[in-house]
Image: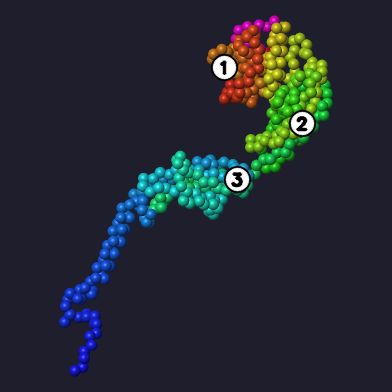
Amino acid sequence: MVPIRRVPVLWLGAGALPDVHVTRALRLPCLFTLIVSAAAAACDRDKSRNPLSPGIRGPIAGVEIGSPRPLSPAAATTIRHDATTVTLTVENASTNGARPLTYVFEMATDASMAPVVHTRANVEPGADGRTSIEVPGPLTAGRTYYWRARATDGANTGPNSSVSHFTVVEPVVYSAPQLLSPVGGATLTTAQPELRAANAARTGPAEDTRYTFDVSLTGDFTDLATSIAVAEQPGQTATTAGPLQPGTLHFWRVRAFSASATGPWSEIGSFRTPSSGPVVPPPGTLPPSLPGGRPAPAEGRAMVDAVIANLRRRGVSMAGDCGAFEITRRVAWAFANRGAGLERKPGGRNCQGHSIDIVLFTDGQSVDMLVGAGVDNGATWQEHGVLPDWRDWWIAPTDPD
């Protein structure tokens, strides 16, 4: 008899093998596949139910994200070229979704926002309702930069903010003015000297330039006799100081400034006033007032005293409100070439609609002439600072005689 060898055979048809063997052989892999598929589907359903899941892709229905609002730099701001950084700040966007927001900032050199020259994504929101980034500088001078921002929660993205812009400018840089006269401790023939300096050289854009002249009784300028600011004049700039103390060595210096920059002080010059002092005006006249900036307190007090003495010599009453106004309007007239005027005052203590004791200058500075109504209450020269809306209150003085 020939022996029969048993060979394992995968039976696919009907016949001698029982159905149970076929079922086990064919159904176990299918069951495993079904279990894995079901688990994956259940996982996907869990992700859909959890809006904070990092696995979510694409927008979530019903979620709306607002637009950030640019705050600073304010539109059309100018920024100095030498700024080391520029900070862009927006007011945070709103959202009705549960997912936290991050921000994307873009900066370009054209209002169309193309090409983008700087971008920052995944910026965490600030805790104070504002979000900022710092753009490293220096940026290119003479160029305008445009910027915007938008918010995203990783699944939904809000609209871009409006486009804001700023311009980078080359800063004004002043050199020190050169003193022309008086210098070297020279003894003068007047106690009201003209101070003259060559204009400061400068680089950068053109700006309205002014000069500050300081005169001091000490070389360290701790005891100022006067400080005068004047507009730049062609080539050289000059102003008149005083009257100053007679027979005294004075020191002076000057520097240029504008709205965006202040230059260095010049070297220190010196001069000596004549020992005879200023000429005393004859009875019935007042000290001369040369054109220039607003009087220093010492000069103002001297004029108030001279006006009172003049009125006494002439027998003019200085009693009551209108008596006080006699002093005030004559001081304003004496300093008319220095920008002095009267203050409109339709209510309260006034004389013919004028303040009885205030002189108002065309730089907005108000000065109190008297302690109270009438000369007996004492003369003074008390600066009160710039009066808001002074142009509405300033009245040009007229010759009181």
Residue 179: image quadrant is top right
- Seen in the picture, residue 118 relative to 245 is either above or below; the reply is below
Q: Which colour scheme is used?
A: rainbow
- Seen in the picture, residue 175 relative to 244 is either above or below; the reply is below
Residue 320 highlighted magenta (yes or no): yes
Q: Mark 1 points at which residue?
A: 345
Q: Mark 2 points at which residue?
A: 268
Provide the residue span drawn in magenta: 315-328
Q: Helix, strand, or loop for circle 3?
A: loop
Residue at 65% over, 17% down: 381
Q: Decide if residue 99 is on the left or right side of residue 375.
A: left
The residue lying furthest to the bottom in this view is 1
* x, y percent for residue 164: 52, 45
Report the quarter where the C terminus lies.
Answer: top right
Residue type pointed to by label 2: Ile
* x, y percent for residue 193: 78, 24
Residue at 65% over, 44% down: 170
Which of 178 and 76 lies nearest the eye of the viewer? 178
Residue at 70% over, 32% down: 211
